[in-house]
Image (cartoon, rainbow, N blue to C red):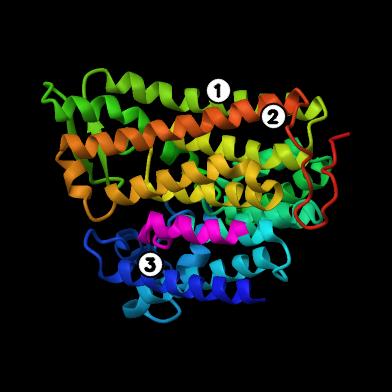
């Protein structure tokens, strides 16, 4: 009981601190919320053309839901309402994670979560990704006992921001209840598409897929490092510029159109390769509780590392898989837990306070970004090795369910 109280106090203090940073820190941490989400929400409320329905949109349709909820307190308090909403969602997931406080592994996962968002900084609460994270955490915590409900939650999150689809794919591959998982997600998705058609948005409901594939190379993406270093070293033709159409910083340089064209196929190929590895590991009878967190983390890392977009909020995608890994495997998940801390701290060092140094391609800041981006591949390599070892059936110790204490079941 005492540990739960201490953790709840820490939860409130950390979220209060992050909220204060969002509102007061330099670098405009809530820039997207204030300058992008709020105008979109006002458009919906005023009857103007709606993105995702009347116009193409970079986000899936259900992203409107949290954006509209934050408007309940009025336009002037939109940012504050957003932060309250994010804190409430985190609190629900945090409470489910803690449970009755009897599981030391779950308590450890809760401590890690708080430490991670403290290291990552205000971006933890300042984007649409912040809505999907607690949804994904709840889903992975209940997926073994309520696979259909977990699938619906992940599908809802995916229709706000695509990344939870990686966790959904991992669950389909790792669990014997894949039929229920697929049917539940398909039913929810069918309902969303029907809603879009009913609202007249049939031509735009899937526009988010094209919006992403048509983008250039974002400044912080791992693939952009080649051009960022060229800019830092003064190579002719290399530069960092602001794209007014999608409101983000991107890189330019020789041959960049070829790289842009290759990135989406490369991302798909890498994702399929990791998914195939996971499938083979499961078919060999590896313990589900050992496979699912690692496979989910690996697939999420592919979406981050092999991506032409590299926004700082992508770090929050690591939370659900790592929380699940710690809750289920304890110390076995120490490596990704520690590496994720390092990635969060390096990301916070870059964004938001000192981001201007990266825009100038100041070499020391480019070094920080380089170390951070290489770290993604190091963590991905750990996941791949762990999956291979799990497939060989050579765990160093039995894997037990964090709640029941029973030995992990093997896939039939």
Q: CA distance from mark 3 to mark 1?
A: 37 Å
Mark 3 or mark 1: whose residue is earlier in sequence: 3
Verify whether residue 120 appears in magenta.
yes
Q: Residues within 10 Å of mark 1 (few under 14, many from 20)?
A: some
Instruction: Give left or right: position of 226 versus 180.
Output: left
Which residue is found at the position 18% from the left and 48% from the top?
Answer: 356
Q: Quadrant of residue 291?
A: top right
Q: Which contiguous range is marked in magenta?
A: 108-128
Asked whether disc 2 touches disc 3, contact meaning CB atoms under 8 Å apart, the reply is no
Circle 3 SS class? helix
Q: Is residue 269 visible?
A: yes
Residue drawn where x is 72% and y is 55% of the image:
150
User: Mainly helix, strand or loop, the magenta region?
Assistant: helix
Q: Earlier in the sequence, mark 2 or mark 3?
A: 3
Query: Residues under labels 2 and 1: Cα distance?
Result: 14 Å
In the rendered image, which quarter contains the N terminus?
bottom right
**Image location of residue 249, percent across then percent down:** 25, 42
**Which residue occupies 52% across, 31% down?**
380
Task: Bin the neighbour count of mark 2 within 10 Å (Cα to Cα): few under 14, some 14-19, many 20 and up.
Answer: many
Q: Which mark is residue 278?
A: 2
Give coordinates of residue 383: x percent, y percent. 59, 32
Residue behind mark 1? 269
* Residue 179 to residue 404: above or below: above
Instruction: Name the mark on residue 18.
Output: 3
254 falls in the magenta region: no
Q: Answer left or right for 307 relative to 194.
A: left
């Amino acid at each position: 009981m005492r540990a739960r109280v201490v953790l709840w106090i820490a939860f409130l203090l950390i979220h209060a601190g992050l909220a204060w940073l969002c509102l007061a820190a330099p670098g405009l941490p809530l820039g997207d919320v204030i300058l992008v989400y709020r105008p979109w929400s006002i458009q919906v409320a005023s009857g103007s053309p709606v993105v995702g329905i009347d116009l193409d949109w970079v986000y899936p349709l259900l992203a409107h839901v949290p954006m509209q909820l934050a408007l309940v307190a009025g336009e002037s308090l939109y940012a504050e309402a957003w932060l309250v909403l994010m804190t409430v969602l985190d609190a629900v997931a945090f409470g489910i994670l803690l449970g009755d406080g009897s599981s030391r592994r779950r308590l450890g996962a809760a401590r890690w979560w708080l430490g991670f968002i403290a290291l990552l900084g205000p971006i933890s609460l300042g984007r649409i990704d912040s809505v999907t994270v607690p949804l994904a955490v709840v889903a992975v915590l209940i997926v073994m006992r309520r696979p259909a409900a977990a699938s619906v939650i992940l599908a809802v999150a995916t229709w706000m921001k695509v990344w939870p689809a990686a966790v959904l794919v991992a669950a389909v591959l790792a669990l014997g209840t894949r039929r229920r998982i697929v049917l539940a997600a398909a039913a929810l998705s069918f309902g969303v598409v029907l809603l879009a058609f009913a609202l007249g948005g049939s031509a735009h409901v899937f526009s988010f897929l094209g919006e992403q594939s048509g983008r250039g190379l974002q400044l912080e993406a791992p693939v952009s490092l080649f051009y960022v270093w060229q800019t830092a070293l003064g190579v002719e033709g290399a530069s960092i510029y602001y794209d007014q159409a999608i409101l983000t910083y991107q890189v330019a340089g020789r041959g960049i159109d070829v790289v842009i064209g290759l990135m989406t196929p490369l991302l798909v190929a890498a994702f399929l390769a990791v998914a195939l590895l996971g499938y083979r590991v499961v078919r060999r009878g590896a313990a589900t509780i050992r496979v699912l967190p690692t496979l989910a983390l690996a697939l999420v890392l592919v979406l981050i590392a092999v991506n032409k977009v590299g926004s700082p909020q992508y770090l929050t995608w690591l939370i659900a898989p790592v929380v699940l890994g710690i809750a289920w495997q304890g110390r076995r998940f120490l490596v990704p837990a520690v590496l994720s801390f390092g990635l969060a701290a390096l990301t916070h060092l870059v964004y938001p306070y000192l981001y201007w140094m990266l825009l100038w391609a100041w070499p020391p800041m480019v070094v920080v970004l380089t170390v951070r981006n290489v770290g993604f591949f190091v963590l991905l390599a750990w996941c791949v090795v762990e999956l291979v070892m799990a497939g060989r059936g050579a765990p160093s110790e039995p894997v037990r369910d964090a709640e029941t204490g029973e030995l992990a079941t093997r896939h039939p």
